[in-house]
Image: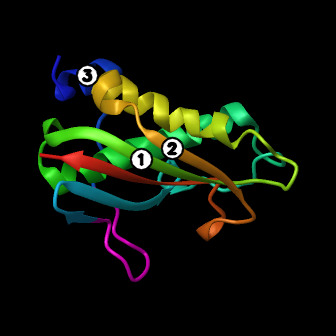
């Protein structure tokens, strides 16, 4: 099954690449690696703000991380013109806005990781990963995720 067919089956319409709000670019290609800048969680076009362990529970945080993955896919599409050019998702780094006692950042990040495997399959979508709890993320977002992909 092609990536486009998987997206359609999952009911995913890729968003356009977001315009950076600061002094950076959304992606940089170096050789066969494509580095995507951090994308923050958005819901209904607005920043999905809040802190895990305070206003947001783990299941909702995983939904926010999945929403970030939709945006990451949109940026991959914009960078490559075709998601079939993704050979492998290499690395995901997730920052989870959380209270000091919160310890389920890895479960929040699963929301994004699972979507990437659903879209690209286990061989191309499984990736190395880090998930960190942080005191704050720009604009108060609950999750920020960056991604590195190997591309054709």
Residue 119 visible, this orientation: yes
* Image side of residue 92 versus residue 85, left or right: right
Residue 6 image label: 3
Callout 2 touching callout 3 (CB < 8 Å): no
Whether the magenta-drawn stretch holds residue 113 is answered as no
Confirm whether the magenta stretch covers residue 24: yes
- Say if mark 2 contacts mark 1, CB within 8 Å: yes
| Residue that carries the numbered disc 2 in the rendered image | 129
**Image position, residue 102 (x, y; %):** 82, 46
Label 3 environment density (alpha carbons within 10 Å; few <14, some 14–19, many ≥20): some
> Would you call the spot at circle 1 few (<14 residues within 10 Å), some (14-19), or many (20 or more)?
some
Question: In the image, what residue occupies the spot 36% across and 77% down?
Answer: 24
Residue 32: x %, y % from top left: 17, 54
Magenta region, residue range: 17-27
In screen coordinates, is 104 left or right of 122?
A: right
| Residue at x-position 61% and y-position 48% | 131
Q: Earlier in the sequence, mark 2 or mark 1?
A: 1
Residue in the foreground of this view, choosing between 107 and 42: 107
User: Looking at the image, is mark 2 or mark 3 nearer the viewer?
Assistant: 2
Residue ID for mark 1: 91
Q: Is residue 11 in view?
A: no
Residue 73's quadrant in the figure? top left
Q: Nearer the viewer, residue 87 or 13?
A: 87
Question: Do residues under tags 1 and 3 come within 8 Å of each other at their CB atoms?
Answer: no
- The mark lying in front, picked from 1 and 3, is 1
Q: Earlier in the sequence, mark 2 or mark 3?
A: 3
């Amino acid at each position: 099954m092609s990536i486009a067919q998987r997206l359609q089956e999952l009911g995913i319409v890729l968003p356009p690449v977001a315009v950076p709000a600061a002094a950076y670019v959304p992606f940089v290609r170096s050789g066969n690696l494509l580095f995507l800048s951090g994308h923050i969680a958005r819901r209904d076009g607005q920043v999905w703000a809040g802190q895990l362990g305070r206003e947001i529970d783990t299941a909702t945080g995983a939904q926010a991380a999945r929403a970030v993955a939709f945006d990451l896919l949109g940026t991959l599409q914009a960078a490559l013109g075709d998601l079939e050019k993704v050979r492998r998702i290499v690395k995901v780094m997730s920052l989870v806005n959380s209270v000091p006692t919160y310890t389920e950042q890895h479960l929040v990040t699963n929301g994004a990781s699972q979507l990437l495997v659903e879209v690209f399959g286990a061989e191309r979508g499984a990736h190395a990963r880090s998930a960190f709890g942080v005191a704050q993320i720009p604009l108060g977002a609950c999750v920020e995720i960056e991604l590195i992909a190997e591309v054709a």
